[in-house]
Image (cartoon, rainbow, N blue to C red):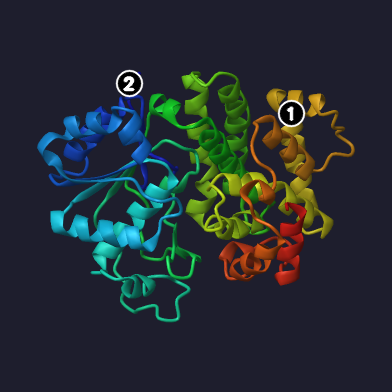
Amino acid sequence: MPESFGPAFAGRDRPLLSFGLRFSESVLKHAVDTFHVSRVYIISSASLARNTTYLDELKKALGTKVAGVRVGMKPHSHWSEILQIVADARQCDADLIVTLGAGSLTDAAKIVSFALANDVSTAEELDTLCPTSPRRRDGIKPSKVPVICIPTSLSGGEYSAFAGATNDETGQKHSFSGAMQAPALVILDPEITTTTPERVWLSTGIKAVDHCVETLCSLGSNDVADESARDGLAKLIPGLIKSKQNPKDLEARLQCQLGARDSMSSASQGIPLGASHGIGHQLGPAGVGHGETSCILNPAVCKYNYKKGANVERQNAIIKILWEDPKAREIFDQERLERETADLGDLMDAIIRALGLPRTLKEFGIGEDKLDTIAEHSLKDRWVQSNPAPLDKAGVLEILKMVL
């Protein structure tokens, strides 16, 4: 397949998107021709490094341009590990960062580049880059070292100028944005995603579906973002079901990857999302996987907002889209759902269960005793604050109790 290369989103220069070439060939081509760099720092998934030859292939392709390699990070991008990479990349004088793996590496790389531009070395200094910090500094500089992402999941963070990272001391996940830049290039290669554990692939696919659903549910969306979200759903729903039925279906996997891109169009425009994302940010540090937070929360948040009358027309429009998808309709028919009575939460629940994904907090050992802290942290999240139905602590707790 010839390379398809250009901006990921119409009307915006970054991020760029490449697919059609082998990932290692694409990285080398763009390191030389697009970014003109000579000192590449690689952040690789530990499982890819351990169980596949992909990291070795990437290192061989780049040859003497490899300045440093980090293998493995904990989920949810811990500050301590980010700072280790900052120190390593600074010592290597890296002029390009490449990630090979899933979402936590992507978020970490964005923050690493941001921290390098602002001479950050400690947790206290990193805190001054956080938009919500009372110690936020003045004169923050934009990220400088470009980032190339080779994603192996569908969470979509490689398309945004936001990143989440967990403060080791407090366990709270913080969002970074502002002068932080999105990755410069995203490289899609569906073949390398076949090594991604099925549950990670499918659950992060539901995270991408959640991006689409919460965009279409948002009271602050617009026609352009809504169109991208609809396009994303049209690729993701059948693509995920086909991926479940045949994990080696590379065309279905590429459609999922392109659907994840579509799903992130809203985030790149700053469309406010809702509580599925906002509360989900705080379930991560409690031990729930990045994509699995959406599997648990999305149906409940849809039901809460619908019950409150916050976005009924917008939810009804999504219901119509889902019933028109043949693959989704097969699932709804199997579950004996009726068009006249099933709400959006019911439809999302049926899709998530058909993919064999988790639906409750108890599956992660989270009981009622943990809910108060999760709710307190959630109230600080910008997307809890922008949920279509206004949320106080009691409202967040109501949603959490729906998914115990």
Residue located at (40% from left, 24% from top): 191
Quadrant assignment, res 276: bottom right
Q: Amino acid at mark 1?
A: Glu
Quadrant assignment, res 168: bottom left
Residue located at (34% from left, 40% from top): 46
Q: Amino acid at mark 2?
A: Pro
> Which is nearer the N-term, disc 2 or disc 1?
2
Residue located at (75% from left, 66% from top): 395
- Compared across the picture, whether 180 is left or right of 361 comes to left
CB atoms of marks 2 and 1 within 8 Å: no
Tell me: residue 362, above or below residue 327.
below
Q: Does residue 11 appear in this view? A: no
Give the x, y percent position of residue 297. 67, 50
Residue located at (68% from left, 36% from top): 352
Give the x, y percent position of residue 304. 78, 56
Q: CA distance from mark 2 to mark 1?
A: 33 Å
Tell me: residue 333, above or below residue 281.
above
Packing grade of label 1 (10 A; few <14, some 14-19, many >=20) is: few
**Nearer to me, 273 or 282:** 282
- Compared across the picture, whether 43 is left or right of 296 comes to left
Mark 1 residue element: helix
The residue indicated by pointer 2 is 2
Mark 2 residue element: loop
**Nearer to me, 217 or 104:** 104
Q: Which mark is residue 324?
A: 1
